Image: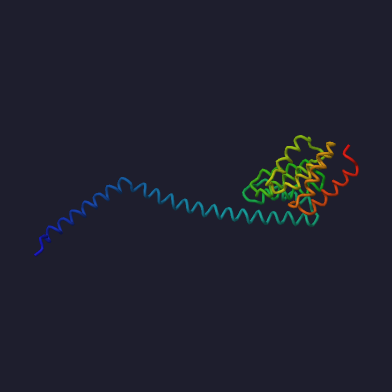
Amino acid sequence: MSDKDPVSDALIREVDEDLKRERAEKLWKAYGKYVISGAVALVLGVAGYEAYSSWKIRQAQEGSLRFATAASEAIRGRDDASLAGLDGLSKESQTVYGPMAQLRKAGILAARKDTDKAVQSLEGAASSDLPALYREAARLQAALLQLDTAEPAKLAAQLDQLAAPGQPWRHSALELQALLALRTGDKAKALEIYTRLSDDVAAPQGLRARAAEARQAIDSQGQG
């Protein structure tokens, strides 16, 4: 015979359920609003992220179309129309096409010998969030455009950064350093750089060939 009284057990369970229900009600009254707020915030957060993602996709699609249209105008020889489209796009930073437009615009402006505006456009691309390869290429192109006009010390400092070990365009920057040395009359420095480049197996073959030719030309003229 069981020592437990079925009636007592039922009463205990009922009291226990009441206590649990009472605690649950107290907890809900105390914290329910936070649970609801958290759920609402989660839903709004997901909805907001989805809306933002959709907006980014639309912006990218629109930017792609505008960039392609401007490039097409340039191919057809309609530089003014191309520049107008690129100029508007270059002022927008929501997608990668803004800084890419700055690079494309710089090419057209450089071909027109509008060096100041081309450099300004390149500097904009260089300070954007493009991948480092493109940013450094923009800096290098800006230095090239100013090779004959920029203050030598300032340009030398820029090229020192671009020619540092590990930089993606270091060999091209070294070549510009040699040209700058020739501009300032420092043939010894130019010869030293060209020698390093012509002997550097990691340098592009075409650049090594140019460096070797330049070294021979300086040797034949003398370093005086």
Please tell me which residue lies in front, 105 or 184. Answer: 184
User: Percent position (x, y) of residue 135?
Assistant: 68, 47
Q: How is the image coloured?
A: rainbow
**Residue, x 73% and y 37% (percent of image)?**
157
Residue 183: name its quadrant.
top right
**Residue, x 79% and y 36% (percent of image)?**
152
User: Percent position (x, y) of residue 176?
Assistant: 78, 44
Please tell me which residue lies in front, 126 or 194. Answer: 194
Residue 162: name its quadrant.
top right
User: Percent position (x, y) of residue 83?
Assistant: 75, 49
Does residue 89 appear in this view? no
Does residue 41 appear in this view? yes
Instruction: Name the image quarter holding the C terminus.
Output: top right
Residue at the left extreme, as displayed: 1
Residue 14: name its quadrant.
bottom left
- In this picture, residue 216 sits left or right of residue 42: right
Please tell me which residue lies in front, 201 or 154. Answer: 201
Please tell me which residue lies in front, 12 or 64. Answer: 12
- In this picture, residue 151 sits left or right of residue 35: right
**Residue, x 44% and y 51% (percent of image)?**
42
User: Percent position (x, y) of residue 223?
Assistant: 87, 39
Residue at the bottom extreme, as displayed: 1
